[in-house]
Image (tube, rainbow, N blue to C red):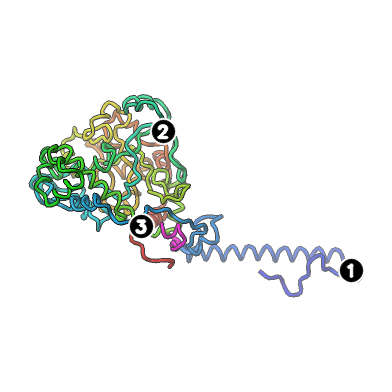
Amino acid sequence: MNLPSNATLPSQLPTGSGPSPEAAKRSLRRRILWILLGIVLAAVVVVGYALIYPERMPAAIGDKVEDLTGANAHPIKLLRPPVAPLSTVAILGREMFNDPSLSASGKQSCASCHSAAHAFGPPNDLAVQLGGPHMTDAGYRPVPSIAYLYRQAPFSIGPDQGDTDAAPISLDVLASDAQGVERAQKNAGVAPVAPAMVPQGGLFWDGRASTLQEQALGPMTNPVEMANPSVASVADKLKHSKYIGTLKQLFGPRVVNDPNLLVSEAMFAIGRYQFEDPAFHEFSSKYDAWLEGHARLTQAELRGLRLFNDKDKANCAGCHLSQPTSDGLPPLFTDTQYEALGAPRNRELAQNKDPKFYDMGICGPFRSDMAKQTQYCGMFLTPTLRNSATRGVFFHNGVYRTLKQVMDFYNLRNTSPEKIYPRDASGKVMVYDDLPAQYHANIDVADAPFDRKFGDKPAMTDQDINDIIAFVKTLNDGYEGGSK
């Protein structure tokens, strides 16, 4: 607020015949009161403006002025995969990827469940897809997207052994060595720490495949998916396909004499298609454009981004890394590690009709090599959040249908479990009801927001959750807004 026009500063007071010292003190006190009144009125205006127009205000004290515009104050250049014509092998892989004749039913291809129009996820919101010889068998788990797997490392436990000359160490030995070592907490914005404590890498929800080639073969022989009874059956279909000539040309005429080799080379071609085609890793979201300074986030999206990265509140980025790498690679929004979250049981799944059945991720039942490593029971791969807002089901069992339900789970699992889990006949809340009680200790209770206790105030408000969802929607590919 401006001072009165007749006010003078202390250094401007005249001398000699001017006011007495007592009068000067009174004048100074009046000016101080005017200044304090101005500060109070300014604060009232700011608070009132924030109440009327909250979307126009910074999310927190100390936010940069640039945030008010929605622009990225520090844009960078992202290092995307090079775009080049597909190799002949990848073109062959694309043809097989879209070929339903490779299934027992003759009606299901890889693309049936991994639709290019749906971010290479399922084209519907079913918890599990139907397959099998007659397309009537329910799958075991929700179909994950196979986009953004080009940087996925093989399944491992512990530090990378690739740069050592020592003989490879078995997973059982590595898992045993990791027992008893305290797991590092996951803080948003920090790269994975102490990876020896948890498994990482791999494909499928339980990491049982380590390469795109292995992953491509899995559905081919899964009895509730493409349902071929054996690798030999897949080889027979390849021999009678319209592209058998291309297979022989690329891999030699003798490839047809060895069913295992023929199928292996075919799956290699499908893997090359997934690796080479830019459609599998577009990095064309609004967030990517914002990182490069070509888009502006709304105030809700900016608030959501800050909450997403806040290690004491949502802490989403503790597992879903949101920052580009030091050399400019775009963030994949996953640390590719495994977590036991304790999601509630989805009683709609066929296998869950049996109360004794439990899907325990890494330690079984669909993966058998880690069955004895019970410290990993209940752990599933952390998926990318890219394009997650386009999905119709979430988590390894498809128990949730909306992002709001997912966020409520993270927010209320510990503080108000009665809102997340069912009650038994006696009225007791059945916490962690999709994992045997002896493995409940594997479930994460250390990382925010799971560090809250029963009865505590939840980490996020409803507005916080809405803002985070607004941000997650900026991770959908296909943004065409430019710098608007």
Quadrant for the N terminus, please.
bottom right
Quadrant for the C terminus, please.
bottom left
Image side of residue 233 versus residue 196, left or right: left
Secondary structure beneath label 1: loop
Residue 175, position in %: x, y?
Answer: 34, 27
Examine the rendered structure and indicate whether residue 91 appears above or below residue 181. Answer: below
Q: Looking at the image, which is closer to me, 32 or 304?
A: 304
Distance in Å between CA atoms under marks 1 and 2: 83 Å
Residue 25, position in %: x, y?
Answer: 81, 63
Stretch of the chain drawn in magenta: 288-299
Q: Looking at the image, which is closer to me, 332 or 238?
A: 238
Q: Nearer the viewer, mark 3 or mark 1?
A: 3
Residue 265, position in %: x, y?
Answer: 21, 42
Secondary structure beneath label 2: loop
The residue identified by callout 1 is 15
The quarter holding residue 224 reads top left
Distance in Å between CA atoms under marks 3 and 1: 68 Å
The reply to whether the magenta stretch includes residue 292 is yes
Q: Residue at x 33, y 53 (%)?
A: 281
> Does residue 71 appear in this view?
yes
Q: Amino acid at mark 3?
A: Lys
The quarter holding residue 356 reads top left
The residue identified by callout 2 is 163
The residue identified by callout 3 is 473
Secondary structure beneath label 3: helix
Q: Residue furthest bottom?
A: 5
